[in-house]
Image (cartoon, rainbow, N blue to C red):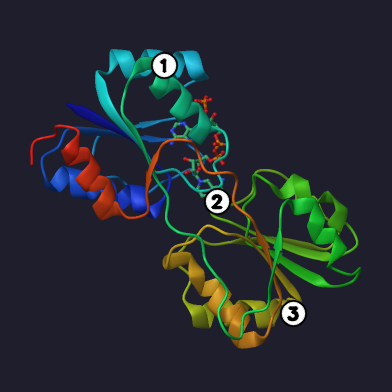
Amino acid sequence: MTVLVLAGTSDARRLTAALAGRGIAAIASLAGAVRQPGPLAVPTRVGGFGGAGPFADYLREAGIRAVVDATHPFAAAITPRTVAVCRDLAIPCLRLERPPWVPGPGDNWTEIREEAEALHFIRPGQTVFLATGRQTLGRFAGLADMQVYCRQIDPPDTPFPFAQGGFVIGRPPFPVAEEEALFRRLGVDWLVVKNAGGGESRTKLDAARALGLPVLMLRRPEPPACAKVETVEAALHWVLSQGAPA
Ligand SMILES: NC(=O)c1ccc[n+]([C@@H]2O[C@H](COP(=O)([O-])OP(=O)(O)OC[C@H]3O[C@@H](n4cnc5c(N)ncnc54)[C@H](OP(=O)(O)O)[C@@H]3O)[C@@H](O)[C@H]2O)c1
Protein backbone atom coordinates (compact mmCIF):
# COMPACT_ATOMS: atom_id res chain seq x y z
CA MET A 1 0.00 0.00 0.00
CA THR A 2 1.31 3.47 -0.87
CA VAL A 3 0.23 6.55 1.05
CA LEU A 4 0.25 10.00 -0.49
CA VAL A 5 1.07 12.81 1.93
CA LEU A 6 0.10 16.24 0.67
CA ALA A 7 2.82 18.26 2.32
CA GLY A 8 4.04 21.81 2.85
CA THR A 9 3.92 21.96 6.66
CA SER A 10 6.14 20.91 9.55
CA ASP A 11 3.51 18.30 10.50
CA ALA A 12 3.79 16.78 7.01
CA ARG A 13 7.55 16.67 7.49
CA ARG A 14 7.16 14.84 10.80
CA LEU A 15 4.56 12.46 9.37
CA THR A 16 6.77 11.46 6.43
CA ALA A 17 9.61 10.81 8.87
CA ALA A 18 7.31 8.62 10.97
CA LEU A 19 6.11 6.69 7.91
CA ALA A 20 9.67 6.19 6.67
CA GLY A 21 10.71 5.06 10.15
CA ARG A 22 8.01 2.37 10.05
CA GLY A 23 8.93 1.28 6.53
CA ILE A 24 5.50 2.33 5.20
CA ALA A 25 5.58 3.11 1.47
CA ALA A 26 4.73 6.77 1.01
CA ILE A 27 5.09 9.59 -1.49
CA ALA A 28 5.10 13.24 -0.45
CA SER A 29 3.76 16.01 -2.65
CA LEU A 30 4.84 19.64 -2.50
CA ALA A 31 3.21 22.49 -4.40
CA GLY A 32 6.57 24.01 -5.29
CA ALA A 33 5.72 27.27 -3.51
CA VAL A 34 9.14 27.44 -1.80
CA ARG A 35 12.20 27.48 -4.07
CA GLN A 36 14.43 25.27 -1.92
CA PRO A 37 12.28 23.19 0.42
CA GLY A 38 14.04 21.12 3.05
CA PRO A 39 14.19 17.41 2.07
CA LEU A 40 11.43 15.06 3.20
CA ALA A 41 12.00 11.49 4.41
CA VAL A 42 10.12 9.81 1.54
CA PRO A 43 10.22 10.14 -2.27
CA THR A 44 8.81 13.54 -3.14
CA ARG A 45 7.08 14.93 -6.20
CA VAL A 46 6.95 18.70 -6.64
CA GLY A 47 4.41 20.95 -8.37
CA GLY A 48 0.66 21.20 -8.82
CA PHE A 49 -1.15 18.24 -10.39
CA GLY A 50 -2.93 20.45 -12.89
CA GLY A 51 -6.47 20.24 -11.52
CA ALA A 52 -8.89 17.64 -10.20
CA GLY A 53 -8.82 15.36 -13.25
CA PRO A 54 -5.02 15.05 -13.42
CA PHE A 55 -4.92 14.61 -9.63
CA ALA A 56 -7.33 11.67 -9.94
CA ASP A 57 -5.19 10.24 -12.76
CA TYR A 58 -2.10 10.58 -10.61
CA LEU A 59 -3.73 8.75 -7.68
CA ARG A 60 -4.72 5.88 -9.96
CA GLU A 61 -1.42 5.64 -11.83
CA ALA A 62 0.73 5.84 -8.68
CA GLY A 63 -1.38 3.16 -6.98
CA ILE A 64 -2.22 5.38 -4.03
CA ARG A 65 -4.31 3.54 -1.43
CA ALA A 66 -4.68 6.32 1.16
CA VAL A 67 -4.19 10.08 1.20
CA VAL A 68 -3.20 12.26 4.16
CA ASP A 69 -3.79 15.92 3.46
CA ALA A 70 -1.27 17.62 5.73
CA THR A 71 -1.23 20.92 3.85
CA HIS A 72 -1.44 24.27 5.63
CA PRO A 73 -4.78 25.16 7.30
CA PHE A 74 -5.05 28.09 4.84
CA ALA A 75 -4.40 26.03 1.72
CA ALA A 76 -8.02 26.57 0.74
CA ALA A 77 -8.08 24.95 -2.72
CA ILE A 78 -6.25 21.66 -2.34
CA THR A 79 -8.11 20.48 0.77
CA PRO A 80 -11.74 20.41 -0.49
CA ARG A 81 -10.57 19.11 -3.86
CA THR A 82 -8.71 16.23 -2.22
CA VAL A 83 -11.83 15.26 -0.31
CA ALA A 84 -13.96 15.32 -3.48
CA VAL A 85 -11.50 13.36 -5.65
CA CYS A 86 -10.81 10.73 -2.97
CA ARG A 87 -14.54 10.29 -2.45
CA ASP A 88 -15.06 9.73 -6.19
CA LEU A 89 -12.25 7.17 -6.31
CA ALA A 90 -13.19 5.56 -2.95
CA ILE A 91 -9.69 6.22 -1.61
CA PRO A 92 -9.59 6.77 2.18
CA CYS A 93 -8.60 10.34 2.97
CA LEU A 94 -7.55 12.00 6.20
CA ARG A 95 -7.04 15.67 7.01
CA LEU A 96 -4.16 16.36 9.43
CA GLU A 97 -4.68 19.86 10.79
CA ARG A 98 -3.22 21.16 14.01
CA PRO A 99 -5.58 22.99 16.37
CA PRO A 100 -5.90 26.76 15.98
CA TRP A 101 -4.27 29.12 18.44
CA VAL A 102 -6.46 30.58 21.17
CA PRO A 103 -5.67 33.84 22.95
CA GLY A 104 -4.49 33.76 26.54
CA PRO A 105 -3.99 36.38 29.25
CA GLY A 106 -2.07 39.37 27.89
CA ASP A 107 -2.98 38.70 24.26
CA ASN A 108 -4.76 41.46 22.35
CA TRP A 109 -6.23 39.70 19.31
CA THR A 110 -9.08 40.66 17.02
CA GLU A 111 -10.38 37.96 14.71
CA ILE A 112 -10.99 38.94 11.10
CA ARG A 113 -12.62 36.86 8.36
CA GLU A 114 -10.68 38.23 5.41
CA GLU A 115 -7.64 40.38 4.70
CA ALA A 116 -9.63 43.45 3.58
CA GLU A 117 -11.03 43.82 7.12
CA ALA A 118 -7.56 44.86 8.33
CA LEU A 119 -8.26 48.28 6.87
CA HIS A 120 -10.95 48.90 9.50
CA PHE A 121 -8.36 48.75 12.27
CA ILE A 122 -5.04 50.08 10.97
CA ARG A 123 -4.84 53.87 10.65
CA PRO A 124 -2.93 55.74 7.92
CA GLY A 125 0.72 56.19 8.88
CA GLN A 126 0.80 53.16 11.16
CA THR A 127 3.18 50.26 10.62
CA VAL A 128 1.83 46.79 9.98
CA PHE A 129 3.72 43.52 9.84
CA LEU A 130 2.06 40.92 7.61
CA ALA A 131 3.09 37.44 8.73
CA THR A 132 0.65 36.09 6.16
CA GLY A 133 3.00 35.23 3.29
CA ARG A 134 3.54 36.63 -0.18
CA GLN A 135 0.75 34.76 -1.96
CA THR A 136 -2.02 36.82 -0.37
CA LEU A 137 -0.19 40.16 -0.33
CA GLY A 138 -2.48 41.52 -3.06
CA ARG A 139 -5.47 41.15 -0.73
CA PHE A 140 -4.03 43.91 1.48
CA ALA A 141 -4.11 46.52 -1.31
CA GLY A 142 -6.22 48.81 0.90
CA LEU A 143 -3.24 49.39 3.21
CA ALA A 144 -1.59 51.72 0.68
CA ASP A 145 -1.28 54.60 3.21
CA MET A 146 0.44 52.47 5.82
CA GLN A 147 3.99 51.29 6.29
CA VAL A 148 3.74 47.62 5.33
CA TYR A 149 6.24 44.82 5.96
CA CYS A 150 5.64 41.36 4.53
CA ARG A 151 7.70 38.35 5.53
CA GLN A 152 8.45 35.63 3.02
CA ILE A 153 10.92 32.76 2.76
CA ASP A 154 12.41 33.37 -0.67
CA PRO A 155 13.95 36.63 -1.93
CA PRO A 156 11.27 38.46 -3.95
CA ASP A 157 11.01 38.14 -7.72
CA THR A 158 8.54 41.02 -7.97
CA PRO A 159 8.79 44.63 -6.76
CA PHE A 160 7.28 45.46 -3.37
CA PRO A 161 3.72 46.61 -4.12
CA PHE A 162 3.47 49.32 -1.40
CA ALA A 163 5.08 52.78 -1.36
CA GLN A 164 6.35 52.40 2.20
CA GLY A 165 7.83 49.32 3.85
CA GLY A 166 9.33 46.24 2.23
CA PHE A 167 9.82 42.49 2.24
CA VAL A 168 11.40 40.84 5.24
CA ILE A 169 13.16 37.65 4.16
CA GLY A 170 13.40 34.81 6.64
CA ARG A 171 12.94 31.07 7.00
CA PRO A 172 11.27 29.77 10.17
CA PRO A 173 11.69 28.97 12.99
CA PHE A 174 11.98 32.49 14.43
CA PRO A 175 12.99 32.65 18.11
CA VAL A 176 10.78 34.89 20.29
CA ALA A 177 13.65 37.22 21.20
CA GLU A 178 14.42 37.77 17.50
CA GLU A 179 10.76 38.43 16.74
CA GLU A 180 10.62 41.00 19.54
CA ALA A 181 13.79 42.70 18.29
CA LEU A 182 12.44 42.74 14.70
CA PHE A 183 9.07 44.23 15.68
CA ARG A 184 10.83 46.88 17.81
CA ARG A 185 13.30 47.75 15.07
CA LEU A 186 10.55 48.16 12.45
CA GLY A 187 8.32 50.10 14.87
CA VAL A 188 5.43 47.69 14.31
CA ASP A 189 1.98 48.89 15.47
CA TRP A 190 -0.04 45.92 14.21
CA LEU A 191 0.64 42.29 13.44
CA VAL A 192 -1.53 40.38 10.96
CA VAL A 193 -1.44 36.60 11.33
CA LYS A 194 -3.18 33.56 9.87
CA ASN A 195 -4.44 31.27 12.59
CA ALA A 196 -2.14 28.47 11.51
CA GLY A 197 -1.68 26.90 14.96
CA GLY A 198 1.36 24.92 16.09
CA GLY A 199 4.23 25.66 18.42
CA GLU A 200 6.93 26.58 15.94
CA SER A 201 5.32 29.66 14.45
CA ARG A 202 3.66 30.84 17.68
CA THR A 203 6.74 32.84 18.57
CA LYS A 204 5.49 35.96 16.75
CA LEU A 205 2.41 35.90 18.97
CA ASP A 206 4.51 35.49 22.10
CA ALA A 207 6.59 38.46 20.96
CA ALA A 208 3.44 40.52 20.29
CA ARG A 209 2.15 39.71 23.77
CA ALA A 210 5.47 40.70 25.35
CA LEU A 211 5.45 44.01 23.46
CA GLY A 212 1.72 44.68 24.02
CA LEU A 213 1.10 44.68 20.25
CA PRO A 214 -2.41 44.20 18.87
CA VAL A 215 -2.89 41.27 16.50
CA LEU A 216 -5.40 40.87 13.67
CA MET A 217 -5.98 37.13 13.49
CA LEU A 218 -7.33 35.70 10.24
CA ARG A 219 -9.89 33.01 10.82
CA ARG A 220 -9.34 29.65 9.15
CA PRO A 221 -11.31 28.49 6.12
CA GLU A 222 -14.16 26.08 6.81
CA PRO A 223 -12.97 22.57 7.72
CA PRO A 224 -13.36 19.87 5.06
CA ALA A 225 -16.02 17.17 5.30
CA CYS A 226 -13.69 14.23 5.93
CA ALA A 227 -11.97 12.39 8.75
CA LYS A 228 -9.75 14.79 10.64
CA VAL A 229 -6.97 14.48 13.23
CA GLU A 230 -4.84 17.10 14.94
CA THR A 231 -1.58 15.27 15.59
CA VAL A 232 1.05 13.39 13.62
CA GLU A 233 0.68 10.44 16.00
CA ALA A 234 -3.04 10.21 15.28
CA ALA A 235 -2.36 10.42 11.53
CA LEU A 236 0.15 7.58 11.78
CA HIS A 237 -2.39 5.54 13.72
CA TRP A 238 -4.95 6.17 10.96
CA VAL A 239 -2.51 5.05 8.25
CA LEU A 240 -1.84 1.85 10.17
CA SER A 241 -5.60 1.31 10.50
CA GLN A 242 -5.87 1.46 6.69
CA GLY A 243 -3.83 -1.70 6.37
CA ALA A 244 -0.23 -0.46 6.24
CA PRO A 245 2.20 -2.94 7.78
CA ALA A 246 2.78 -2.08 11.48
N1 LIG B 1 -1.63 29.12 2.30
C1 LIG B 1 -0.72 29.31 3.23
O1 LIG B 1 -0.80 30.21 4.06
C2 LIG B 1 0.46 28.37 3.33
C3 LIG B 1 1.41 28.57 4.34
C4 LIG B 1 2.48 27.70 4.46
C5 LIG B 1 2.60 26.66 3.58
N2 LIG B 1 1.67 26.48 2.61
C6 LIG B 1 1.84 25.35 1.69
O2 LIG B 1 2.05 25.83 0.39
C7 LIG B 1 1.38 25.01 -0.56
C8 LIG B 1 0.50 25.87 -1.44
O3 LIG B 1 -0.41 26.55 -0.61
P1 LIG B 1 -1.65 27.33 -1.23
O4 LIG B 1 -2.26 28.14 -0.17
O5 LIG B 1 -1.26 27.94 -2.54
O6 LIG B 1 -2.61 26.08 -1.54
P2 LIG B 1 -4.00 26.02 -2.30
O7 LIG B 1 -4.49 27.37 -2.61
O8 LIG B 1 -4.86 25.10 -1.55
O9 LIG B 1 -3.57 25.28 -3.64
C9 LIG B 1 -3.33 25.94 -4.87
C10 LIG B 1 -2.82 24.91 -5.84
O10 LIG B 1 -1.50 24.51 -5.48
C11 LIG B 1 -1.32 23.14 -5.74
N3 LIG B 1 -1.00 22.48 -4.49
C12 LIG B 1 -1.25 22.90 -3.21
N4 LIG B 1 -0.71 22.07 -2.32
C13 LIG B 1 -0.10 21.10 -3.04
C14 LIG B 1 0.65 19.96 -2.68
N5 LIG B 1 0.92 19.66 -1.39
N6 LIG B 1 1.13 19.17 -3.68
C15 LIG B 1 0.89 19.49 -4.98
N7 LIG B 1 0.20 20.56 -5.36
C16 LIG B 1 -0.29 21.36 -4.41
C17 LIG B 1 -2.59 22.65 -6.40
O11 LIG B 1 -2.40 22.83 -7.78
P3 LIG B 1 -3.09 21.93 -8.91
O12 LIG B 1 -4.51 22.38 -8.95
O13 LIG B 1 -2.30 22.23 -10.14
O14 LIG B 1 -2.95 20.50 -8.49
C18 LIG B 1 -3.62 23.62 -5.85
O15 LIG B 1 -4.76 23.73 -6.66
C19 LIG B 1 0.59 23.96 0.22
O16 LIG B 1 1.25 22.72 0.08
C20 LIG B 1 0.59 24.45 1.65
O17 LIG B 1 0.69 23.41 2.59
C21 LIG B 1 0.61 27.31 2.44
Q: Report the side of 137 relative to 66 (left or right).
A: right
Question: Which residue occupies 84% across, 68% down?
Answer: 122
Seen in the picture, residue 49 relative to 22 is either above or below; the reply is above
Can residue 181 be seen in the rendering of this structure? no
Mark 1 to mark 3: distance in Å? 51 Å
Q: Position of residue 18 (x, y in %)?
A: 20, 49
Q: Which quarter of the picture shows residue 169? A: bottom right
Q: Depth-wise, is mark 1 or mark 3 nearer the camera?
A: 1
Of the residues shown, which amino acid type is indicated by label 3? Answer: Gly
Helix, strand or loop at label 2? It is loop
Q: Nearer the viewer, residue 73 or 102?
A: 102
Q: Position of residue 182 (x, y in %)?
A: 62, 77
Question: Which residue occupies 58% across, 44% down?
Answer: 222
Q: Nearer the viewer, residue 230 or 141?
A: 230
Mark 2 to mark 3: distance in Å? 23 Å
Which quadrant holds the C terminus? top left
Disc 3: which residue = 187
Disc 1: which residue = 88
Disc 2: which residue = 154
Q: Position of residue 48 (x, y in %)?
A: 48, 27
Q: Position of residue 160 (x, y in %)?
A: 75, 52
Of the residues shown, which amino acid type is indicated by label 2? Answer: Asp
Q: Report the side of 71 relative to 27 (left or right).
A: right
Q: Depth-wise, is mark 2 or mark 3 nearer the camera?
A: 3
Q: Report the side of 8 relative to 222 (left or right).
A: left
